Structures are given as structure tokens and as C-alpha cells.
Image: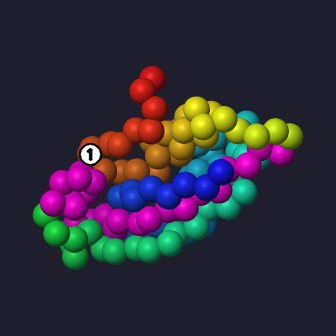
Amino acid sequence: MAGTCPVAVDRDDLAEDLGDQVRNALGPDADCVEAVEILTETPCAELPPRALKRLGASPEHKNVLLKVVLRHLDRTLTDHEANLLRDRIYAAVHQGSTHQWATIS
């Protein structure tokens, strides 16, 4: 199951840094992560005010469209399970002050 999510991250974060953050956030579930990829990135200083507000980002951040591929080794993840994993990843990676959750906990 693959998904993308716009997130505000430190302007110096690299794909490898975000991959480490994703795997650390999932702990024992990290084996479900097949790939972490930055599809696009834009310095937040270049974003329009509406986008900054939606992300809760500051000019010190950059906006990345992060693609995470989740695949359990032994079975198919349900949508609910994948959304819970997505929210854990999002909570660990997104540094903006506003959030867009996939699930209601």
C-alpha cells in the first residue's frame, strides 16, 4: 500500500533522514516499510501564505511530498492498519503546527 503526504520538515532533512525517522517511529512495525521517497520539495519561504497556513509551517521548513510504501511481509494490511501506520509516520515526521490525520483515534 503506497501513500503520499505533504509534510513540513527541517529544511536540511534528506530522504535518508526521513527514512530513519519513519522506521524509528514504527519501531517493531518498521519491517512494513518497503520504501520512503521524496517526490517533490519546496522551501516554505517560497510557498503562498495559504499553503503555509495549511501546513502550519514556517520559512525555516521545507514542504516535501513524502511517498511511503507499506507492505507487510506475511499478509495484506487493512486500510485501517495502513492509516494507523501512516498517522504514526506523520506524527514523527511533520514539524508543522497543524495536522491532517488519516484516522480518528
Q: Is residue 15 magenta?
A: no
Is residue 89 visible in this depiction of the protein?
A: yes
Look at 22% across and 76% down and name the residue there: 46
Total numbered circles:
1
Q: Which residues are magenta?
A: 50-73
The C terminus: image quadrant: top left
Is residue 10 visible in this depiction of the protein?
A: no
Q: Nearer the viewer, residue 83 or 43?
A: 83
Image position, residue 79 (x, y; %)? 60, 37
Image position, residue 38 (x, y; %)? 52, 69
Look at 35% across and 65% down and name the residue there: 63
Farthest residue, direction top:
105
- Label 1 sits on what residue type? Ser
Q: Is residue 58 magenta?
A: yes
Q: Is residue 23 above or below residue 43?
A: above
The residue identified by callout 1 is: 97
